[in-house]
Each structure stands twice: as C-alpha cells, then as structure tokens.
Amino acid sequence: MTAKTKTTMTPEKLRSSRWFEAGDFRSFNHRSRMMQNGYAIEEWKGKPIIAIVNTWSDLNACHGHFKARVEDVKRGILMAGGFPVEIPTLTLYETIVKPSAMLYRNLLAIEVEEMARCHPLDGLVLMGGCDKTVPGLLMGATSAGLPSIFVPAGPMLRGIHKGEFLGSGSDAFKAWDEFRAGEITREELDGVCDGIARSYGTCMTMGTASTMALVTEALGMVLPGASSIPAVDANHQRMCSDSGRRIVDMVWEDVTPDKIMTRSAFINAITTAMAIGCSTNAIIHIIAQARRAGHNISLDDFEAASRTVPVVANIRPNGTSKYLMEDFYYAGGTKALLNRIRDYLDLNQLTVSGKTLGDNISGAMVYHDDVIRPLDNPIYKEGGLAVLKGNLAPDGCVIKVSACSPKFHKHTGPAIVFDSYPEFKKVVDSDDFDVTEDHILILRNAGPKGGPGMPEWGMLPIPTKLVKQGVKDMLRISDARMSGTSYGACVLHVSPEAYIGGPLALVETGDTISIDVAARALTLNVSAEELQQRRERWTQPAPRFGRGYGYIYSQHVNQAHTGCDFDCLESSFGTNPQEPDIF
Ligand code: FES
C-alpha cells in the first residue's frame, strides 16, 4: 500500500501568492521588485516558488560541487512547473570551522527558519551534507513548516595512497599516531595528506556526515537511495534534478515536514543509526530534530534500539572494516541496507517520495554481503552505541562500543584530570607525563555551555610516550563530542556538563572510575559525602565569550542529553504569530 498524498493546494492558496496577488500596494511593490531581478510575471505567477537553500562556499570542499549541482536542482524545478530561487546560506565545513562547527548548527537552523518565513516561498530544497549542515538545515525547515526535501552532498571518493585505500579522519588519526611513534616518515605522512581527500563530497567513512545522510533517508526526508550516491557520480546530478521535480509536487500535495517526521519516523532513524554503527554525534542531532518536530525522543530510545539492532554496515571506523562509503554504494547502498533491516522498521511511514518507506525499499538487493552483512552475521551483535549512567553522569553519556577496544568495556583506573584542552596539550608529548594505559584521561569544561559548542575534543590523543610503547587505546571521559570518524574507548557527552557543576567538575586526579558497558554503568568511586564537600568548594569557570553569538549560545543552549538546541527554539517553548499577521 502506498501513502501517495492527494493534490490539495491551488495556485490561489500558495503561500507566495500572498506577496504578489493580494491586490494592494504591497503586492504591486513586491511584483515590481521581482521584475527588478529580470523575472517576467508569468515566470512565477501561480507557480510554487521553491528556495534552494545552498550551503556552498569556496571554503567548503564537502559542498564544492553544490555550485554546479544547484543548476541540476533548478532544472528539475523548472521541468515540474515551479519557480526556483537560490538562497545561499551559512556554510559549515566541519574540519575548518573553529572552535567547532557545532557552535553554529543552531545559527544555521535559525537562518533557514527565518529566511523561509520572511520570503515568498512555498517549498525548500535543502542542500547540505557536511556534518552539522544536515541537522541545521532540517531543524530550520522543521520549524518553518514548509514542504522540504533534503539533497545530500554525497560521500567523496575513497582516499588512496601507495595502493592502500584511506578513510577520512580515521586514517588521518592513524597516520598521525604512527608519525608520533616514529613508525613513518614525514614524507609518508605527506603522502597520506595528498591522497586522503581526492574529490568534492563528504567524509567517506561512517562518520557524522554519512550517518546523518543515511539517517535522514530513514527519516523520510531524502529521495530513495539518494543518501549514499558518491558526490561525483552522474547519478548524483540526476538525483538533484529528481529532487527539484519532486519538491514541486510536494507543494501541490501539501506534504509538510510534520507529515513525514513523526515519532515512528524518528525511531526508524534511530534504528538505522544503530544498524550502521553511527557517529555518536547522531544522538545529539536526532534528539534535537525530534524536539523541533514536537516529539520527545531521549537517550532511552537509543539505548532500547542499541539492545536489539545489530550493526550490519561494515564501514570504517567500525570494527576492523576495510570498506568505505563508495563500497557501500556499490553493495546496494541505503535502500539495500534498509531492506535488510526492514523487520526492525515501521515501513508505513510517509516519505518525500510520496510513498511509504516500505515502498521505497521494496526489492532493494544487497550485492556484497561483507559490506552490508546479513542479520545473522553482523559485525556487532547489538547496536554500536551504549548509553551509560551513574553518579558521574546522572543524565547519561555515550560510548561507541563498536569502535573501541573490548578490554575497556569493563575497566577501573585512576583519573588524570584536565580542565581544558590547552592544559592537556601541554603534557601530551612529554616523556615526563606520569601516565599508563590503565589511567583514565578526563577532559572537562568542553560541553555545550563550557566549550561552548561541545568541540570534538573527546578523542584525546593517546600520550606520545604510550604511543611509542605501542598503546593503541585507553579510556577517556569528557563532556565534549568526538568526530564520527574517530575511534577508541571514549566516553562522551557526559551530562550534566562540568561547566554548570555536573559531577565531572568534582573529579580529582587520583580518584578511581569504573566503567561497565554491559551494566551500562559509569561510576566515580568517591563517597557522596566527599562529593558534597567538593561541590561546596566548586566555583564556575569564567565564561569564554563575554559578548556576541558565543554569549547568546551559552545563555540558551540545552544540555547534550536533550540535543543542544536553544531553549527558545524548541517547539515546546512557544509559538510564532500566525502567518497572516506578518502582512
Ligand atoms: Fe565535511 Fe567530514 S569534513 S563531512
């Protein structure tokens, strides 16, 4: 059964017609100013006006092809009888933006929502892909409430150096560690630098970008199969044109985001995240998106899925995989993966295609069983993430168990505490650093308010002294995030964060901490009485930003376990004026 929607919109009811057809002075003025652009009235009159929200910039190589792809989207919109307008918007290149692209995710969401609200628009094509652009665009579109379709940037080609395939992030971290250990030369390191990012497109490991693209398809906001097409494949151009055609129909059918992004659709997204061994960042973004859409998704939903859904996408950095997103696409891609885990999904959910998720994936075949594993031969029996709780993280924290050494699934060790990343950097390369592989490195004041913006500092580098001894993993705990391409025994997103006085703020060097992944427990082995005395002595660190956006961010951002949206942007905070009030 399909969920094909009916045509409910008419030219007179189009939102944009309020700007141009009201018969008053303002509509006269609006028409004349459109004509100032060189548009004849008949080019847009009675047609859905579609904004192509483009996150291209000369600095963002993940979106470098969007400058050309936008023409494919426009072609599709024109073919379907719509009127395309490109709206360039905030671009966030994960690797380049400092202190963290996460600091600006909410700003992008605000921009998308407000640009959509204040302009004569009927629908949105959201062009994004690099990590935070996916949730930022979707959160803004959700709040704007206009029919919207997401166009994923697609992964870049595999990296390659001396005949070996390289994965974004993961192999850069590995090469850097080998260089620090004296195992490879500077020339070798430079060769990795040359070969690891060979084309436009997003990181081609199962990092945050790939995770969020696949999850967005499971959510229903991407055309079937679109999320895994490599950025430079001609299929990507055709997908862009298809998306342009489809958004015009979505406007006529009045398919608004709330009809797609239901609670069940978010559970499908979480299920998919678990099956692909997702980036830990997905937890924060999915929760934030769901709360924008008015659904109370929490860490408990991730924990429940984690207990039942096996990891079947065998893509780096999970396990010991040699495969990358290009291999995943050739193995059948997202449709094949979703079809393989179909028994875990609610297949009746409506998607942007106008059909159900079940219809979208029907008959999709897997062509390589080692890349997309059968359910009875997963790379990890349970979901790749675990949500831990305990006196060190009363509101929860996460660990990517599928990408860390099993010996740290249960471990007790002494803590070494750092109040800031610069403090850690001072000692990381020192031969005098008093550290063993059994120690637990703690980084704090790197959370949503303390960072601010939760920089991806959670995969603290293994101290050079230990790297030289051959140590590949050790336990690290922080209120920061880590890149989706990172790996190792890193406990992240500790909530509440240290900056607001969470228990992480009370840990002292030498305290012992115990982790037990099977029991989902993280325990600071210090008595409640002693912790209370430390709490009475604790003072909040000085804010990092005394003005501007950083200050606004710190004032309004929520904690990690609720998605790090601004309090005033969540759907539960309040409502905007009804649209006719705007005129
Ligand atoms: Fe853009 Fe990794 S830097 S997806």
Image: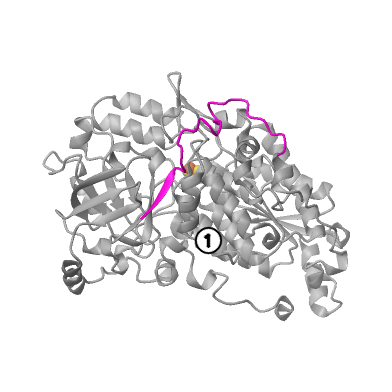
| Residue located at (38% from left, 42% from top) | 401
User: What secondary structure predominates along the stretch shown in magenta?
Assistant: loop
Q: Residue 199 lies in what quarter of the image?
A: top right
Q: Residue 339: x and y, percent?
A: 65, 38
Q: Residue 227: x and y, percent?
A: 62, 41
Secondary structure under the numbered disc 1 in the rendered image: loop
Residue position marked by numbered label 1 in the rendering: 297
| Residue located at (34% from left, 28% from top) | 189
Q: Residue 190: x and y, percent?
A: 36, 28
* Relative to 499, residue 65 above or below: above
Q: Is residue 471 left or right of residue 394?
A: left
The C terminus is located in which quarter?
A: bottom right
Mark 1: few/some/many CA within 10 Å (<14, 14-19, 20+): many
Q: Is residue 527 left or right of residue 34?
A: left
Colour basis: one colour
* Relative to 191, residue 131 above or below: below
Residue 377 on the magenta span: yes
Q: Is residue 419 left or right of residue 28?
A: left
Q: Residue furthest top?
A: 163
Residue bounds of the magenta highlight: 362-388
Q: Residue 430: x and y, percent?
A: 15, 41
Task: Kindly tell me whether residue 162 is visible in this rendering.
Answer: yes
The kind of residue on which mark 1 rests is Ile
Is ligand 1 closer than 8 angstroms to the Cβ of mark 1? no
Q: How many marks?
A: 1
Query: Between residues 16 and 138, which one lies in front from this camera angle?
Result: 138
Q: Residue 140 lies in what quarter of the image?
A: bottom right
Task: Kindly tell me whether residue 458 is visible in this rendering.
Answer: no
Q: Residue 65 lies in what quarter of the image?
A: top right
| Residue located at (74% from left, 48% from top) | 353
